[in-house]
Image: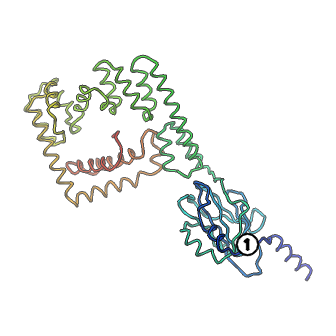
Amino acid sequence: MKTITLFIMLITLLSCGSGSIGEKVEGNKLAEVFSNQNAPEGYATLFVYREERAATAFGVMRVLIDQEKIIELGNGSYTKLYIKPGKHHFKLKFYEDDYMAQEIPFNGEITADKTWLLMSDYFGETKKIVPLELAQVQTKLQPFNYQDAPQKVVATLNITNEDRELWSSFINKNSVVAMDNFIYLYPYSPYSKDAKNRKEMLIKNENLELANARKKAGAAPLIAFVTKYPQAHNKEEALKEAIKRSNSSKAMKKLATLFPESIPLMPTHYRMEFELMNIGPEEMKIEKISALLSKEKLPPGIVSAKVLASAGMYKDFSSDEIRFLQKMGIGSQVIEAMINSNTKAQDEMKRAQKDEAIMKQIKELIEKSQQQVSAQAVKNDDGNSTIECIKQKSALEACAQTTSGFFKMACDATARASFNCSSL
């Protein structure tokens, strides 16, 4: 019976292994261990620590990262690794058998801006990965034994089906903006480098396609290019060329309708016309005012009354703009009504913006709208909206759904000023 018992104990000890428990470090070696100076560029520092037990406990803890064994840690030992930022899969094995491996619950991402500590008790019953300040890690680990890892750099990443599906949803959008959004939202994704490479490829492709469009006659090839790549990095260049080739008012109007962002690039005459036509509240824009006067032949007094009733914002027209409006057949009475309506709307909006209670409501409304602007919203976008524009769109929709009148004007103005988007 004693022989059998001894045999079982021997087998158990052999299965646990007997790896070195390392040694205490001090002086220069200690300073080197608790320093990030030697970390490869872009990598995070990860310390791994196994709790100390009785001096007679010599079994090793095998640390696996992304299915690869990195080190066998002894009793009361720690080691230091450099790990690629991103998602990883961590396991601990106290026996060689795979079925005994213990997964460490960690659904986050390792980031390069933090120092990380993987801690486990002796048997792996309590284990976790946490970000800490380097000084905190040193205070905790310095009393224990340090082991040099045979493999100090972990360059692998754990790629899941979710990662693959997410990348697939972005790559199908085939736009530089989509790649920028992916890099911004998922900087530590296993596909972040692919996104950067694809962005470079798309830029080269856009340059080539624009060059080919320029070789063809007329504005149509350039319009086709901007239609195909609505957020191309060289979009402004293409629009300027299309404007040069549009030699009639009809062609310019078509371009302005298709791409409103082309209007500021147009010659003064066209720019003033198209910008002015779009000014005013939705129900009484200047384009409609012009139609009421020229096509429906309504008297200026009635049109002026309708303008004032709309109580909308127009603008403080310059002398050139007033002369241009008069050439279009909009007389002084109607222009005066627009200026008065604008002055009243501006005054009311300023009063609303000075009202702390109202502005608090507006800011809370915009902040609430941003809670719905998730990574999923960007993922579902067609790939042609920047993140700032998606956020602004959500804020403007919230203003439209929950406010009206001058409150809505103040809300819209705040929403537009809060995000860097020029296309809305």
Residue 228 is situated, as x and y percent measured from the top left of the image, at 46, 29
Colour approach in the figure: rainbow
Could you tell me how many numbered marks the image carries? Answer: 1
In the rendered image, residue 270, in percent from the top left (x then y), is placed at 26, 26
Which residue is rendered at x = 73% and y = 66% of the image?
62
Image height check: is 23 above or below 37?
below
What secondary structure is found at the residue carrying circle 1? loop
Question: Quick check: can you spot residue 193?
Answer: yes
Q: Which image quarter: residue 40?
A: bottom right
Q: Residue at x 32, y 50 (%)?
A: 418
For image coordinates 19% across by 32% down, the residue present is 286
Left or right: residue 329 compared with residue 205 = left
Q: Which residue is mark 1?
A: 22
Measuring from the top left, give residue 363's x and y in whole percent.
Answer: 30, 56
Can residue 162 be seen in the rendering of this structure? Answer: no
Please rate how many residues cluster around mark 1, counting C-alpha atoms within 10 Å: few if below 14, some from 14 to 19, many from 20. some
Q: Which amino acid is tagged 1?
A: Gly
Does residue 348 sit above or below 295 in this rendering?
below
Judge from the rendering whether residue 59 lies leftward or rightward of residue 378; answer left or right.
right
The quadrant of the image that shows the N terminus is: bottom right
- The quarter of the picture where residue 219 lies is top left
